[in-house]
Amino acid sequence: MAIINCPNCTKRMSSLAAACPHCGYPLKESTPEERAKLETRRFNQKVDRAFNLSYLGLLALVVGALWWWFGGAAGWHLPPPVPAFLLVFLGGIAYFFARGWLFWLRMNRRRR
Ligand SMILES: [Zn+2]
């Protein structure tokens, strides 16, 4: 008997169990191809989410930068308008977090 990760919810379960105790996924009735397909779909969903976050972060960054440029005095004056600064700051964090997440996802994928 081995402990595996459920192909549906990724929680730990016994490889001998007929179904996942967490989500009820019928492991015994599923074929390896089905499981691989599920895993690929889960992986692609995570990659999509990371991409969406990186685009959202980039958008916030650009909007914040433009706001900073056009809000008040011309150019990137100091101090920046608070909402513009927040957009740039949070957008930057979201973007770099998403890129790191994508990198991590791909590293993990390759190791298998
Ligand atoms: Zn499960």
Image (cartoon, rainbow, N blue to C red):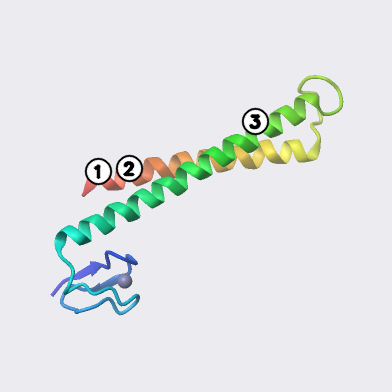
Instruction: Indicate left or right for 80 with 87 as reference.
Output: right
Please tell me which residue lies in front, 32 or 78: 32
Residue 62 bears which disc, if any?
3
Q: Which residue is mark 2?
A: 106
Q: Secondary structure at mark 3?
A: helix
Tell me what residue is drawn at x 76 percent, y 29 percent.
Answer: 68
Q: Amino acid at mark 2?
A: Arg
| Tag 1–tag 2 contact (CB < 8 Å) | yes
Picture quadrant where residue 31 is located: bottom left
Q: Secondary structure at mark 2?
A: helix
Tell me what residue is drawn at x 51 percent, y 40 percent.
Answer: 54
Mark 2 Cα-neighbour bin, 10 Å: few <14, some 14–19, many ≥20: few
Residue with the most extreme top position = 75
Residue 76 bears which disc, if any?
none
Q: CA distance from mark 1 to mark 2?
A: 6 Å
Of the numbered discs 1 and 3, the one sitting upstream in the chain is 3
Q: Position of residue 110 (x, y in %)?
A: 24, 43
Q: Which residue is mark 1?
A: 110
Q: Secondary structure at mark 1?
A: helix
Q: How many marks?
A: 3
Tell me what residue is drawn at x 19 percent, y 79 percent.
Answer: 18
Mark 1 Cα-neighbour bin, 10 Å: few <14, some 14–19, many ≥20: few
| Tag 3–tag 2 contact (CB < 8 Å) | no
Q: Amino acid at mark 3?
A: Val
